[in-house]
Image: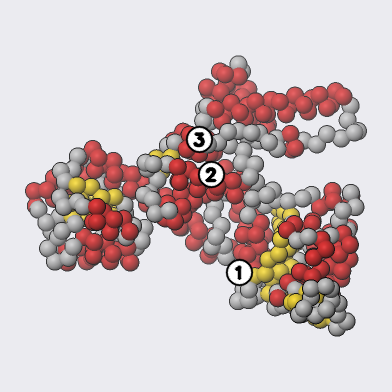
Amino acid sequence: MINILVAEDKESFREYIKEVLKTGDFNVFDTENGKEVMGLFESKDIDLVLLDLRLPGKDGIAISREIKKVDSTVPIIIITAYGTVDNAVAAMKLGVYDFIEKPVDPDRLLHLVNRASREQQLLRENIILKEELSKRYGFSRIIGKSKELKEVAILAQKVARGDTTVLITGESGTGKEVFARAIHSMSPRKDNPFIAINCAAIPSELFENELFGSEKGAFTGAVKRKIGMVELADNSTLFLDEVGNIPLALQSKFLRFLQEKTFVRLGGEETHKVDVRVIAATNKELQREVKNRHFREDLYYRVSVFPIKLPPLRKRKDDILLLAEHFINKFTAELRKRKMRFEPKTKKILQNYRWPGNIRELQNIIERAVILTEGDTIHPEDIGIKESLEGIESEIEITDKMSLKEASRIGKRIAEKKLISSILLRTGGNKSKAAKILGMSYKTLLERIKEFGL
């Protein structure tokens, strides 16, 4: 049962509001005095507040400010006969859910209350999930409840306590740096700064200088000593993103650093020793890089002492809407826009999309939708998803050892998977409708969906 507090000084209107709310099966507490609001709010476990702007004892803006200090997640709907632009702006700046004028249409009021209640429940579920992961795994920035996410979270928790070198793999946008930071935050090194370096963003000729530093006069333009990343990370964690991009010529020197935790600055002679824990990440298949002689085999084994493979978002279907709701709350707050929700069809599209760009793509799509959406509902056209189906064929590797018949069979599977995925997206996940369009039985479609992992 949802507890609603109604604060309204006019008794007849207060009784009217209570009667309207009773049709929605809410538990209602009421008061006519502004001074009594906080006492009721704190003692009755209130989930939503309906507040008159002008109350005896204390005005609605002041009360809203006090409520938000106690619990920022509680929706407040201000009802007043004195609606002005200034009042609306002041209320919205405090995070008030909505602002409506008397006389109040009962259907609109119920719609607002129901929507606010749903959104608050989702927000609190997200907070609980984040707190649970933070408490159990030390992850405060990782959102999700899927089995796949929890499995990698447990691995990260176990390895965090020591100094073992970790290799985090996964597709682009799966949150490799977020996991690396979580491991650091659970480690004994957490009070020291997390040092990150993107190996793909550094020109090969500058890599040694960035990593190990240089002495004054080491090269043209070296007018003073430069401290490298490994030295900055002393007694802390060094995160090497896209470790597969370390120049081949420098890999033996980096291997020596991993083994001995010593280095020499470029242009120097003195050997320096540091206490650094290394976490590496890549979206490349490093074993394939080793085979192609782009990455040293001995370095691969030294880097991948404890591998953690992050699942792509399409394998975490239970987390898609949780993440989407999190991004809605994030961007509506940043852009100072009213709370928004997804149309049911939009939710289905989000859940059935393949997410080749993973969490990063989801975040970008939601940010764009929040910017473009004028109302409070995000429709399918607002998210702008068009299934490109990139990457489906990359899940099955063609080798020169196959016969033409085997390759043809794989080609047929790729075509079927592409078509079924596209139709499911078009129908918003409606499998019955998709089966009719595809001209196949519902049972056969379910078998194909299971077989292809869609």
- Horizontally, residue 72 falls left or right of residue 139, namely left
Q: Are marks 2 and 3 in contact (CB under 8 Å)?
A: no
- Marks 1 and 2, the one that precedes in the sequence: 1
* Numbered mark located on residue 365 in the image: 2
Give SS at disc 1. helix
Q: Is residue 4 above or below residue 264?
A: above
* Numbered mark located on residue 332 in the image: none
Query: Mark 3 sits on what residue?
Result: 348
Three-letter amino acid code at the position of disc 1: Ser
Give SS at disc 3. helix
Viewer-nearest residue: 305 or 424? 424
Q: Are marks 1 and 2 in contact (CB under 8 Å)?
A: no
Specify the quadrant of the image occupied by residue 304: bottom right
Three-letter amino acid code at the position of disc 3: Lys
Residue 389 at least partly seen? yes
- Residue farthest to the bottom, as pictured: 270
Residue shown at the point (48%, 34%) measured from the top left: 381
Q: Residues within 10 Å of mark 3 (few under 14, many from 20)?
A: some
Q: How far from the left and from the top, in percent, is residue 349?
A: 52, 35
Residue shown at the point (86%, 64%) measured from the top left: 250
Viewer-nearest residue: 392 or 228? 228
Query: Mark 1 sits on what residue?
Result: 185
- Horizontally, residue 105 falls left or right of residue 200, namely left
Q: Is residue 7 above or below residue 239?
A: above
Q: Are marks 1 and 3 in contact (CB under 8 Å)?
A: no
Q: How far from the left and from the top, in percent, is residue 108?
A: 25, 40
